[in-house]
Amino acid sequence: MKKTIFSLISIVGLTLGLNSCKNVPQNAFTEADKEAIKSTATEAVKLLNETKDIKAYVNTYYAENAIVLIPNTEPVKGREAIITANQSFGDSKLDFIINDVNGKGDLAYVYGKYNLELLPSGVKDNGKYIEIWRKQSDGKWQVMYDIWNSSVPIQSDTTKIEK
């Protein structure tokens, strides 16, 4: 009887001990990852809005080989091309709202909405975006793919073409 109780206690103790040693799975996406992404996005947009340093914004936000899918253009590939594309917009003010962040391992997606004002003209745009982020070898999260589109209706010529 004593042997049976001792064996049972040993098995339960061993099971509890092994279960308590489990690590977070390697492909886990943690709250710390979510916060790192949100923090990087906030820091980058702050750089853009406050310092107008497009290069610093792009280097903070985008991975070296990122691809940006800007409406009505071909894909923009790599940081240097992304810097040039952003410079073509001129001075602007960007605000965003992150609606969802999730991922697995070293990949994550972000869904959000944005508000953009071109300065000094005051032209405004708003819309939505999807980004795919990757954790870089240095542990930082950066955007690999970025696509956005406007929610503002397209202004079109209402003149009818007659046959």
Image: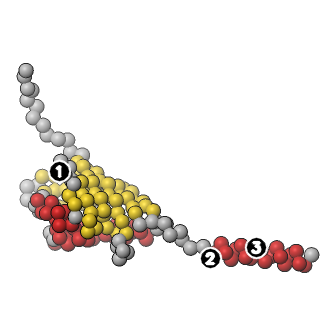
The Cα–Cα distance between marks 2 and 1, rounded to whole angstroms, is: 52 Å
The residue wearing badge 3 is 12
Q: Is 121 drawn above or below residue 157 in the view shown?
A: below
Q: Are marks 3 and 1 in contact (CB under 8 Å)?
A: no
- The label nearer to you, 2 versus 1, is 1
Disc on res. 145: none
Circle nearer the N terminus (3, 2): 3
Disc on res. 73: 1
Q: Is residue 125 at all visible to an observer of this figure?
A: no
Type of amino acid at the residue the image marks with label 3:
Val
Q: In the image, what residue occupies the spot 24% across and 46% down?
A: 151
The residue wearing badge 2 is 21
Label 1 neighbourhood size at 10 Å, few (<14), some (14-19), many (20+)? few
Circle nearer the N terminus (2, 1): 2
| Furthest-right residue in this view | 1
Location of residue 46 in the rendering, given as x and y in whole percent from the top left corner: 23, 69
